[in-house]
Each structure stands twice: as structure tokens, then as C-alpha cells.
Image (spheres, rainbow, N blue to C red):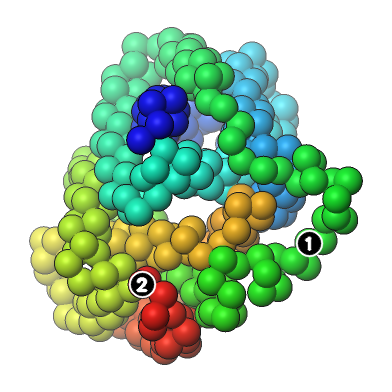
Amino acid sequence: MNKNAATQLHIYSAFFVLAGFVLNRGVFLLFLADKGMSVTEIALYQALYNIATVVLELPTGLVGDFFGKKFSIQVGVLLLFFHTAGMLLLSGPFLVALSLVEALAYSLQSGSEQALLYEIARNAGQGERFLTINARLLAAQSIATGVAIVLGSFIAQVSWSALYVCVSVFYLLQLFLLYPIERMETTHSKNSGEERFDVAKIFRRETWSIGESAFAVLLLLIGTSMLDGFYGSYYNLNQLVFDAFDAPVSIIGIFFGASYAVNATAYIAADFFSSRFGKRNTMLGSMLIEAGLFMILPWFASNPLCLFGLSMVLCFLPEVVYITSENLIQDAIADDLRATILSVASLVRALFSAMFFSIFGYVLGLYPIQIALGVIGAIAIAITAVVSLNAGARLFGCSAQGGL
């Protein structure tokens, strides 16, 4: 292994884990309320953030491929620093406007972070071990997030200003870690004189490294992103589900705090099962087991403790699906549009997450909890069937000799 490339991987790994150490993540909405924002204004902030994220995902992915993934991430972190400073210094409608800055910042990072990690790992001679590396880093990042949420809540009890100053310091530390990372990827700006950039190339066969199965990979990307949007919506819905049982806020907090430890375990488990059964079999098996668990979900609605345990498992398996499918997609796409294509996945995920959450909220408000969970389970089975039979089957058929 090239020593410099290995050093680059270690430095970027430190940045990757630190990016999850967001101290204000668990108390952000409480801070907005403390700043005097009404519930309506907070809802407007969230709505603007979600809309802007959907609109900006694809353009910001193109920024990463045009000007470099490191550049895109650096600008994103810098914007988060300014966003944090603005939260401290501004008030009123200006706070709502900051949602657009936050959305732009995270959109600039969303596709480029994973894309750059893949390319740095490959350049370090670790391309074949990317799933293992990614699993360990995501596990470490999840643990860092859980620790940050707890630590941030204690700092917030002392001083909101102290909390946001600490958050700003960590963003500066991220920029410090990014500085020595070399720009190893080829960008469109370097090749602008050789060929005209064509957005439609995203969907053409030459974009994908595996040629004949390009359409299958596109189906896999859209299908698993749609499924991930469904899983994410149900994860957030647990707040309302547990509230329907009059669960104490502390219990709900324990569930969401523990879910980060569950995520970390899932990433390591995904690597373990993939090494024994293959990535595609691990992904498909997890999808089918998850669908089966959603099928029995209504029968647990009468027992809050059992529902709590089952919901933990329903948080575990989606992370296995996510990391294995993301690895299959990373292996199949070319470098010059890697950030853009991963941003497309984020775009699809955000769209379906918003759509499913709206549907789930409507169903939960219209029917008793047991019937509502039955409807959600039926939707889960239908989506899983479509994704596994279409995207999964096509990918397996096209890549039977490709070692996926």
C-alpha cells in the first residue's frame, strides 16, 4: 500500500467520523423555540429545509463532479460554520432563512462524502475492502453521533451559546482535517476542453463501469433509495407511535439514542454477513426479513414493550440494506459522475421519505394504531416485492459473472 495514500485514508477517516459529532442534533428544535420561534415558524423552517434539499441535491452533486469532491465538502462545512454563527447572532425571520443555508451545506456534502471515501480507499489499494472500511466508519460515526447528542444536551442545559460555540469549533476542526487531503479524482473542469459535459450521460451505459447491467444498477439505485426513504419515514414515525401508547418522553429518547448503537452494530454485521453470503444476498435477505417483520407488526401493537423491541430490529435491518446496496452501486459507477449519481440517490430518498411520512401521518391519524400499523406493513411488503423482483433480479441476472 502506498504510504501517502494510506495516510490520506486515515486522515479522511478521522474527518468522516468527526462529521457525525454534531452536538446540537438532538436539541436543535428546542434551541429554535428558545430563540422565540413559534411552532409554525419551526415547522416552516423544517419545510423549507426539506424542499431546498430536494431541489439542491442534483445541482450540488454536479458541483462535486465539476470542481472536485473535496472542494464541495469544504464549502459545505464552511457554510455549516456560518449557519451555526448565524443561529447565535440572528433572530426572527432571518433564522427561517438560515434553513436554506443549512440545506445547501448538507447537499454539497451528501453525495461527495461517500464518493471521495470510495476513491481514497481505492487509491490506497483498499478498493476490495471498501465495504469493511465503510461499515467500520459508519459504525464509529453512529457512536459519535449518539455521544454528541448526550453531551450536547448537557451543554445546552448550561448555555445555548456555549453549545453553538462548541459546534462551530468542531466545524473548524473538520476543515483542518480536510486541508491535507489531496484532490486525486478527475473532475469535469479538468476535461472541459476535451468534451462537452452532458447531464444525460448519467443515464447512458458508458457512465457505468459494468456496461451491460447499467439499467439494472439504475433500478437498484432508485429502488433501494425509495425503500430507504420508507424505512427512514417509519423510523421518525416511531415518535408518534410510542406517543400513542402514552410512553414517557424519556423512553422515546432512550429508543432514539439506542438506535445509533443499533446502527453501528448493523454496519459491522453487514460486513460480516457479506463476507460469508455475498453483498447481494445479504441485501436481498435483509429486505425480505424486514418485510416479514412488517407483516407481523400489527400483532405487536397491543404490547408496547414487544413493539419497542421489534422496532429496534426494524431499525437494524435497513442499515444493512443501505450499506450493502450503496457498496454495490459504488462499485458499478464511474468516477467522473460519482458524486452526481450518489446525489440522485439522496434526492430519491428525500422525495420518498417526505411522501411516505405524509402518508403514514395521515394513516395514523385516521385509524386505530393496530390497523394503521397493518396498512404500513402492507405498504412495506409491496415496496419490497417491487424492489427485489425488479431491481434485484435484473442486477443478479446481469451480473452473474461479475462477482457482485
**Distance from Cα at disc 1 to Cα at disc 2:** 29 Å
Mark 1: give few (<14), some (14-19) or many (20+) Cα within 10 Å: few
* Residue at horizontal 32 percent and vertical 40 percent from the top: 137
Residue kind at label 1, given as amino acid type: Val
Q: Is residue 285 above or below residue 194?
A: below
Mark number, residue 403: 2
Foreground label between 1 and 2: 2
In the picture, the quarter occupied by the C terminus is bottom left
Q: Position of residue 141 (x, y in %)?
A: 33, 37
Q: Is residue 315 above or below residue 263?
A: below
Residue at the image position 53 percent from the left and 41 percent from the top: 116
* Quarter of the figure with the N terminus: top left
- SS state under label 1: helix
Badge 1 is on which residue?
199
Q: Is residue 60 visible?
A: no
Instruction: Answer whether labels 1 and 2 touch (C-beta < 8 Å).
Output: no
> Which mark is on residue 230?
none
Query: Residue at coordinates 79% horizontally, 41% vertically from top-left?
Result: 189
Residue 207 is drawn in which quadrant?
A: bottom right
- Kindly tell me whether residue 221 is visible in this rendering: yes
- Is residue 114 rendered to the left or right of residue 105? left
- Could you tell whether 395 is left or right of 201 in the image? left
Crowd tier of the residue under label 2, counting other residues whose Cα lies within 10 Å: few below 14, some 14–19, many 20 or above: few
Q: Quadrant of residue 392?
A: bottom left
- In the rendered image, residue 294, in percent from the top left (x then y), is placed at 27, 77
| Amino acid type of the residue that numbered disc 2 sits on in the rendered structure | Gly
